[in-house]
Image (cartoon, rainbow, N blue to C red):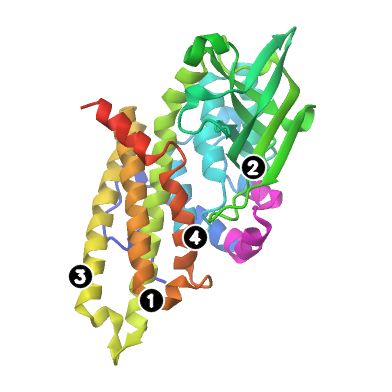
Amino acid sequence: MTNPAEILGLPKPAWAADEVGMLYDMAHRFMSEEIAPRYDEFEKNEMVDRESWLKAGAAGLLCASMPEEYGGSGGTFAHESAIIEAIGHVGVDGFGIGLHNSIVAPYILHYGSEEQKKKWLPKLATGELIGAIAMTEPGAGSDLQGVKTRAEKDGNQYKVNGSKTFITNGQLANFIIIVTKTDPEKGAKGTSLIVVETDEVEGFERGRNLDKIGLKANDTSELFFNDMRVPTSNLLGHEEGQGFVQLMQQLPQERLQIGTGAIAMVERALALTIDYVKERKAFGKAIIDFQNTQFKLAELKTEATIGRVFYNDCVARHIDGGLDPVTASMAKYWLSDLQGKVVDECLQLHGGYGYMNEYPIARMFRDARVQRIYGGTNEIMKLLIGRSL
């Protein structure tokens, strides 16, 4: 197969050089050798097994951007991008380590006490703890101010009641950051983030592993909290009510990470499709020889190149601390929209075979769709961008 990482013919950005490039190669090899051969099994079981998480931790693919003193590799988001891109280029998109690495772990690094960081981050780095963040509820999705889950202080514990849904890594996660109301009267200012280690708590219940259209290998669950008691020391931040601010500060990286998966899949879809149209024949000639095919692929490659250049710039800005929420929203919405368009057009170029599950483009078509929904719907992204005008 044509190398998706080289399909656009662009030079590597400065942030992807040296050790980041070597990490990409190592991650690509790991995903190709350890995850891809079993990926059909993981899709059937609707989760990647815990053993694979531990192997990823042993290989240094968990918490790459966390400081070495807490068990990480001391990298930046560039290193996380290399890992997520490798996942996308190999085509094992349901392996949920991106959320674990660059969404869950940073909350502990930025808002956790020194004791919390020393306690949790090393175990997240080995895969002993698998992370999730419980934001969405049956009645509250993109509107995080509308969460109903409640945490009431009772001595040195919180009593937590409520439910969450669509929680990525939800069946395997034993380390969950819960978005909850500690003071419902204060609205957003009454929101807090509380960590629960599910192996050590009563009143916690997992619901079903949700039956999704795509990303079948990624467990996505309902969670229930019934008088669940959590130590008050598991609050993130020095005081209650900081949760909404913490979420807003970290959402740009989450949205950029969605863009990472998007551009990686775009590149893989193009690489697969170019290979396919060169081999497949119709009316006595290769499909690539038809002008329509060339024009379509010319358009897609041009847009993919624009997307990659924009993405690279966003990563560079983020590493320097300059990626603002509006630009991150642009990246999330535009790149995930592009992903949907490119995959759809590439499936069309496969003809009837593109609709067959045995062809990778079919799985990509299913897997791509959710990108425009989670992390805040693309309509919400446009609303945020609109407010900046």
Question: What whole-number distance in Å separates the C-alpha atoms at marks 1 and 2?
Answer: 35 Å
Q: Is residue 166 above or below residue 384?
A: below
Q: Residue at x 65, y 17 (%)?
A: 151
Is 346 on the left-hand or right-hand side of 96?
Answer: left
In which quadrant of the rendered image does the C terminus lie? top left
Q: Amino acid at mark 4?
A: Gly
In the image shown, does 143 or 361 lie closer to the viewer?
143
Identify the residue position indicated by label 3 in the image.
Answer: 295
**Among the two numbered marks 1 and 2 on one chain, the one whose residue lies closer to the N terminus:** 2
**Among the two numbered marks 1 and 4 on one chain, the one whose residue lies closer to the N terminus:** 4
Label 1 or label 3, whichever lies nearer to me, is 1
- The image position of residue 200, as x and y in percent, is 78, 28
**Among the two numbered marks 4 and 2 on one chain, the one whose residue lies closer to the N terminus:** 4
- The part of the chain drawn in magenta is 34-55
Image quarter of residue 79: top left
Q: Residue at x 43, y 36 (%)?
A: 376
In which quadrant of the rendered image does the N terminus lie? bottom left
In the image shown, does 281 or 18 lie closer to the viewer?
281
- Residue furthest to the bottom in view is 284
Label 4 or label 3, whichever lies nearer to me, is 3
Q: Residue at x 28, y 60 (%)?
A: 8
Question: What whole-number distance in Å separates the C-alpha atoms at marks 1 and 4?
Answer: 21 Å
Residue 46 on the magenta span: yes
Question: What whole-number distance in Å separates the C-alpha atoms at marks 1 and 3?
Answer: 17 Å
Say if residue 71 shows up in the picture: yes
Question: What whole-number distance in Å separates the C-alpha atoms at marks 4 and 2?
Answer: 22 Å
Label 4 or label 2, whichever lies nearer to me, is 2
